[in-house]
Amino acid sequence: MGEAQLLVEDGNQKLFPCEVCGRCFATDVLERHGPICKKVFNKKRKPFNSLKQRLQGTDIPTVGKSPQPKVQPVRKSNWRQQHEDFINTIRSAKQFTLAIKEGRPLPPPPRPTSNPDYIQCPYCMRRFNETAAQRHINFCKNQTSRPVFDPIQMAARLVSRAQCKAQASLKK
């Protein structure tokens, strides 16, 4: 108690601050408060789970811990490539407007650039981001495995059906 400074004098009692929380107490109360305060402030509080409390006493089973989200690898930034594409687009647009003003033939359009992060579909050669590529490749695989519509073959089927129906109606 000797190192604690006198903070406030309340009537006839001298109040001293707690070393842990800084609140002021009388000497006899501070002796009881000190160990309790140290014990409380040393503990790490668990976060309150309102879902667990709401589900207490119900028939709904509590859900276990959810798996940690997968840490995705950090992709290398391709800002330099994007910047160069942007500059080339601006230059070609200037050439285009200049050619229109002067009446010259139009310059060829700039070549398209592909995003290196995109995945190419092996069936249709289009490019998609990862999530869209997963969906599309399955779809495209099913589409390419379907039989192709052949109008000549379809016409032959219709003719044969008509002949079968004609024969069936003659038999009756």
Image: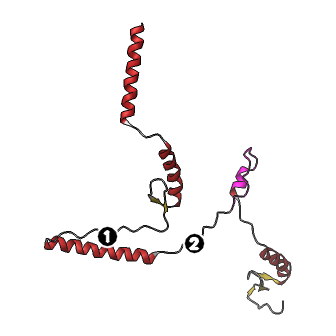
The label shown at residue 151 is none
Residue at mark 1 to residue at mark 2: CA–CA distance = 31 Å
- Which amino acid type is marked by label 1? Pro
> How far across and down, in percent of the image, does residue 20 sit?
77, 82
Counting other residues with Cα less than 10 Å from the Cα at mark 2, is it few (<14), some (14-19), or many (20 or more)? few
- Which amino acid type is marked by label 2? Val
Please tell me which residue lies in front, 129 or 42.
129
Asked if the magenta segment contains residue 129, the reply would be no
The secondary structure making up most of the magenta span is loop
> How far across and down, in percent of the image, does residue 83 sit?
39, 76
- Relative horizontal placement of residue 122, taking residue 66 as reference (left or right): left
Q: Is residue 12 above or below residue 162?
A: below
Q: Does label 1 or label 2 sit earlier along the sequence?
A: 2
Secondary structure, mark 1, is loop
Q: Is residue 130 above or below residue 76?
A: above
Quadrant placement of the N terminus: bottom right
Residue at mark 1: 110
- Relative horizontal placement of residue 99, taking residue 114 as reference (left or right): left
Residue at mark 2: 74
Please tell me which residue lies in front, 101 or 63.
101
Residue shown at 64% from the left, 64% from the top: 70
Q: Is residue 73 above or below residue 52?
A: below
> How far across and down, in percent of the image, does residue 82 sit?
41, 74
Please tell me which residue lies in front, 72 or 85.
85
Mark 1 vs mark 2: give the one in front.
1
The stretch of residues the image draws in magenta is: 51-67
Q: Is residue 75 above or below residue 28?
A: above
> How far across and down, in percent of the image, does residue 45 sit?
75, 69
Residue shown at 19% from the left, 74% from the top: 98
Please tell me which residue lies in front, 9 or 24.
24
